[in-house]
Structure formats: structure tokens, C-alpha cells
Image (cartoon, rainbow, N blue to C red):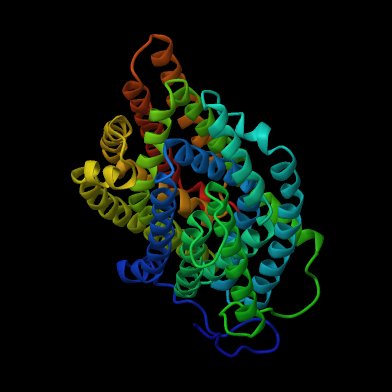
Amino acid sequence: MTAAPPRPAGGKDSTREPRGTGTTRRIWELAWPAIATNLLHSLVGLVDIKVVGSLGASAVAAVSTGHRVFFILQGVMMAITAGTTALVARHWGAGNRAEAERVTRTSLWMCMAFAGILTAPGVLFAGQLAGLFEGLDPETMALAAGFIRTISLFNVAFAINVVLGTALRAAGDTRTPLLIAVATNLVNVFLLYGLVFGHFGLPTLGVQGAAMANGLAFVFGALLTIGLWLGRVLIVRWGPTGGDFDRARVRQILHIGYPTGLEQFVFQAGLMTFLMIVARYGEAPYAAYSIGVNILSFSFLVGLGFSIAASTMVGQNLGAEDPDAAERSGWRAMFLSIGVMVVFGTIIIAFAEPFARFLIDDDEVVRLAVIFIWLLGSVQALMGIEFALGGALRGAGDTRFPLWIVFAGFFLGRIPLALVLAWLGWSVEWVFAALLADYVIKAIGLVLRFRNGRWKHAI
């Protein structure tokens, strides 16, 4: 673990992150642990699909639906942590670590409160939430509702993991979250096999066992992270007491973060709308979409690693009053993200069929999953732009433009095109292809926004 350096009592620190951090080496230092963490989560996601895939396509569709609804409910947390990222990075770059730590604590209390509130709809209205996905058969919807109800009980633990991990990354420590993720996911996999199949003396719970395994892993990760935090092991410490609920700080976190919350809502609403169109073609296309996304997530989460690096470097350089370095780091992160995602995407496309066949033994689902992988794998360069420059804008506190560009991608591109193709009676493969318009719109918009430089004055 990374221990924090000594600090003067006044909160300001005489040591700052170096201004010349806009280099390839610095980006890799920040990105590779985040990439490894994301790939680990993705690998465990594939294990989830593999394990429940042995129970049939209905189980895969139920777990995918449950996860989708779960992350809709986390949109509020994403809003808060967007403010956490921008403010912690900005204060850390300026050398004001005491304020960065206050922001962390304030964000934690806010996220835990909202997570507790969000537990109620997940538990009480699980059936209605699962029912949003028309076209799923009653058995699949019942399984999905049980999954949603169970995993919603662990919202608070999930919030703790997200907030403290976000603060560490914003301060420039991406390695500690990796180590915590390794431990957490080992627990997750152990419980997954045990609770789904009844191994290790645990009860046989099937699909609900997957939800319980995920939730208990969240609890383990939260307890581990809090222990390290209170034990002064983490680079971001508890910090000076008092002022956690300062109105100005709360307002600033919400002002920066609420567009990201709306962005998550728009993204999830757009994705749910698209999946409802796909679900009308039957269970096989819906399961194929889920499997394809899980396989390609190895590439997506590489891009997310560069997004985290771009957010941290842009925020810290702006805090150190070096906007030129912030801009260089954003462009450099974009080119690295494009290069690495294209390599990953090419490999995944080449082995699409054996990867899909490994996850499920259903010829029609495999066929559609391979087509989906080919389509989405072809736009990895555009997704690389979205991840890196979207992260750079959020790190600068410019969270409104990513909201509008996500809206445009879905509701001016993907959704209208998919609806027209479905209305014309074209096959689901053409509906899958509608997502290409989404990524073209987003990539063009983000490049133009980053070039005009308005994000440098977002805070």
C-alpha cells in the first residue's frame, strides 16, 4: 500500500505533483493499475456469465438485466464522485491536501445517504424494474427481479468502495485500488461458485447466489478499504476534522457532479431503450448483446483506465495552474487510448467465436454475439476518443458537455436509427449496427470541445 508523505499542520503541502506530468510515462503510471483493476472486474464479470450460463440463456438474461438496473440506481453516486474526482485532483495538484481529504469525507457521507435511499426502490419495486425490459419471458423476469432485490441491499457498501477508490485515483494512487480489487474479486469468485452451485458447504441459490456473491464482495471491499483509511495507510487520509457538511463544499460537489448523474441517467435510459428494441426480437439476441458486451469489456475497461489517468492529470495540472500541461496530457491520453483499444479490439474480433462459445453453448446466441462483436469492435478508435477526452473534461470539472454528447449519441443517433430499422422489419443484426452512429457523433463532439479549450475555466 502507498503511505502518505508527512504534511505540515496547516493543510497546505510544500510538495506538489510535478507540473510536467503530461508525458507518456506518467500516463502509463496512472493508467496501468486502473486498467488492471478494470480488466480484473471484467474477468470476474465473465466468470459470472460463465457460471450462470450453465443454467441457461434465461439465467444470463436475468443477471444482465439485474446488473443493468443496479447500475441505473447508482447514477446518483456517479454524480457525486464526478465532483470528488475534479475537486480532489484540483486540490491535490494545488498542494492543499487537507481540503482534498475534506472533499473525500463529504462525498462519502453524501454517497452513503443516497445509497441508503436508493435501496428502497430496488427492494420494493424489483419486479416493476425487471418488467421494463419487454420481450423477456416470465421466468427470466422473475429471476431478474430476485437478483435486483438482493443486490440492492448492498448499495451502501458499493458506495463506500466507489467513493474511496475515486479519491485515491484522483490523488494519483491507482495501485492501492488494484490491490483491494484483487482481494475483493477473489472473495467474489469463491462465493459465486459456492452460492450458485452449493459448493463449500454453502446453500444452492442459483441466479440469486450470483447477486449475493456480488453483494458480499462489496461488503468485504468496503470493510477492507475503511480499515486502511482509518489506519492511515492510504495516501488520502481521514484528514482534519470538522466542516464535512460545509454548504459551499456540498454545493460545489453537486454543481460539478449533477450533470454526470444526468449523463448516467441518459446513458442508462438510452441503453434500456435500445435493449427493449433488441428484446422484441427474442431472448437469443438479448443474451447475445450481453455476452458481446462482456467480451468486449476487456477493451472498454482499458479505455476507462486512460479516462482515469486523463481525469487525474488534467485536474492536477489545472490545480497547479498549468493549463497547457493539462491540454497536452489530455491529447496524449487520447492517442494512447486509441492505440491500445484498437489492439485489444482486433484480438477480440479475431477470436470472437471461441470466446462466445466458451460462455454459452447455444448456436444462435453465439452467431449473433459474434456479429455484435465485429460491429462494436470496429469502432474501438472512436470509443478510445470518448473515454480519454470524456475523462479529461470531467477532470477539469466540465461535466455538462459529456452529458449533452451522450444524449446526442443515443437519442439523435442510435435510438432513432434502431427504431426505423425495426419498423422496417430488418433483422436484429441491422439494429445492432445502429450503435455505430452513436460513437461517430460522440467522438466528433468531444474532439471539437477539447480543442476549443473552454473546459480550462469550468471551475
- Residue 204: x %, y % from top left: 54, 55
What residue do we see at 48% from left, 76% from top?
A: 17
Mark yes or no: residue 259 visible. Answer: no
- Residue 97: x %, y % from top left: 62, 77
What residue do we see at 36% from left, 67% from top?
A: 32
Mark yes or no: residue 446 visible. Answer: yes
Question: In the image, is 341 to the left or to the right of 310?
Answer: left
What residue do we see at 37% from left, 23% from top?
A: 431
Residue 458 to residue 423: above or below: below
Quarter residue 442 falls in = top left
- Residue 377: x %, y % from top left: 28, 40
Name the one closer to the observer, 340 or 119: 119
Farthest residue, direction left = 350
- Residue 38: x %, y % from top left: 42, 59
Question: In the image, is 344 to the left or to the right of 309?
Answer: left
Residue 319 to residue 208: above or below: below
